[in-house]
Image (tube, rainbow, N blue to C red):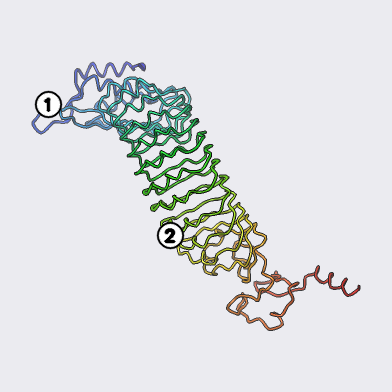
Amino acid sequence: MASFPLFFVGFLVLAGEAVLGQQSSDGFQIEMGKEELLGLFEVLGALLGDSSWAQEHPQPCDETPWPGVQCEIGDENPPMFHVTKIHIGPDPACKSSATLSESLLKLPYLKTLSIFNCFLTSPVTLSPTLLGALSSLEHLALVSNPALSGELPPSLAKISNLRVLSLSQNNLLGKIPGNIGGMVSLEQLDLSYNNLSGQIPVEIGGLRTLSILDLSWNVLEGQVPGSVGQLQLIQKIDLSSNRFTGSMPPDTGKLNKLVLLDLSHNLINGPIPETLSGLEQLQYLVADNNPINTEIPQFVGKLMKLKSLSFSGCGLTGPLPNSLSSLKNLTALSLDNNSLTGTVPPDLGTLPSLNQLNLSNNQLSGDLSLPEEFIERLGKRLDVRGNNGLCTSNPLYKKKSISTNLITPLCLNASGPRDGKTLAGEHPNESDRMKPCSQYPVQKSSGSSWSYELNSCSFVVCFLYLML
C-alpha cells in the first residue's frame, strides 16, 4: 500500500465515521463510508504531486467537488455516496514516483479509471491481482505512460463488465493473452503504440461486441487469424505498422459494418481476397507499404461508400481499373510508388468528391487527358510525377499556376487545347499546327503565352544529315 500523508489521517479523524454532505429527500444526510473515502485518498495520494488537494476538497463528492472524481448515490437504505470514476492527467500533474495503489480495491463501485501521461519515470507494472479484482470496472484507460511496462496480465479477462480497454502509448511487451477472447462485454480494444509481440490470438474472435480494434505500432507477427471474421459489430480495424505476413483472411469480407481497415506498413502479400467486396460500409481502405504484388482487383469499384483508398508502395501491377470511376464518394486516391501500367482513365477527373490523386512513380503512359476544371481544383494535390511514358495534348498542364507535380511533356501529335484556343486565348495559325514533331513548346520568360522554337539538338541532327 502507498504511504498515506498525515494530513489525510488527520482529516479522517476529524470527519469521524462518515463524510456528511447532500441531504436526501426524506431528510437523511447522504454519507460516504470511511473505508471508501480512505481508499480514494490513498489512490490519489499515490498519483498526485499536489498534496494540498485533500484539504481543499475534503468532501470530493458534493460540497467541495474535485473534477477528477465522480460519485453516484447508491440504492442502499440509507443511501450513500460511492466513487464511480477517477480521471487523472495531464492536469493536475502526477508526481514523479506515481504508482497504482492497491487501495483501488477499497473502491468496489469504481466504473471508470483513466490515467493519462502520469507514469513518466518510475517503472510501473500492471498488477495481476489488482486488476482482476476490479469487478465493477467498465472503462479502463491507461494512456501515454512511458514508464508503464511489463506484460498484459491474463487476469484482465476476469473484468467481465469491461467495455473499453485502452492501453495505448505505453511500453507494454509480451504476448496478447489468449483468454482476452473471454471479455464478452468488450466494445473497444486499443493496445496501439506498445512493444507487444507474438501473434493475434485466434480467441479474439470471441469478442462479439467489439466495435474498435487497434493493435497498430507494435511488433506483432504471423498471419491475421480468420477468426476476425467473427467480429460482426466491428467498425474499425487498425493493424498498421507491425510485421504481419500472409494474405488477409477471406472471412474479413463478412464484416459488413466495417468502416476503416488499415493494414499499412506490414508484410502482407496478395492476392487481395475477392470476398472483400462484401465490405458494404467500408470508407477507408489503407494498405500502404505491403508486398501485395498483384493487380488492383475490379471489385474495388463495388465499395460504393469508399472515401479513401491508399495502396502506395505495394508493388501493384497492371492497369488502373475503370471501375475506380464508380466511386462517387472517393475523396483521396493514393497509388504512388507502384508498377502500374497503361493510361490514366479520364473519368477519374469526373469524380465529384475527389480532391487528392497521387499516381506518381509508376509506369503509366499515354495521353493524360483529365478535365481542366479537375486539374485546377486539385492543384498540388494532383501528382503524376515519375511516369516517363505520360504526355499531354493540353498545354494547360504546363501553365505556371498549375503544380509542378503535373509536369508532363506534350504528346508528339499535340495540336493544342481541344477547344482550338491557345492558353492565352489566341487561335493558332495553320503553320503552327504543321510544325514538325522535333519542335517542342517553350514558355517565354516575359509572359504566359506560348511559342514554338526550334530545338537546337534537332537542328544539329538535320545539318549533319545534309552534310552526308
Q: Residue at 26% x, 30% y: name it.
A: 84
- Would residue 281 be found to the left or right of residue 345 on screen? left
Image quarter of the C terminus = bottom right
Q: Residue at 48% x, 32% y: name it.
A: 199
Q: Position of residue 355 (x, y in %)?
A: 49, 60
- Return the residue at label 2: 329
Q: Nearer the viewer, residue 293 or 85?
A: 293
Which amino acid type is marked by label 1?
Answer: Asn
Q: Secondary structure at mark 1?
A: loop
The outermost residue toward the left is 26
Q: Residue at 38% x, 28% y: name it.
A: 179
- Return the residue at label 1: 77
The disc placed on residue 348 is: none
Q: Nearer the viewer, residue 3 or 106?
A: 106
Q: Position of residue 183 (x, y in %)?
A: 33, 32
Q: Position of residue 441 (x, y in %)?
A: 70, 71
In this rendering, the count of numbered labels is 2
Q: Earlier in the sequence, mark 1 or mark 2?
A: 1
Q: Secondary structure at mark 2?
A: loop
State how far apart marks 1 and 2 are (Cα): 57 Å
Q: Nearer the viewer, residue 372 or 461?
A: 461
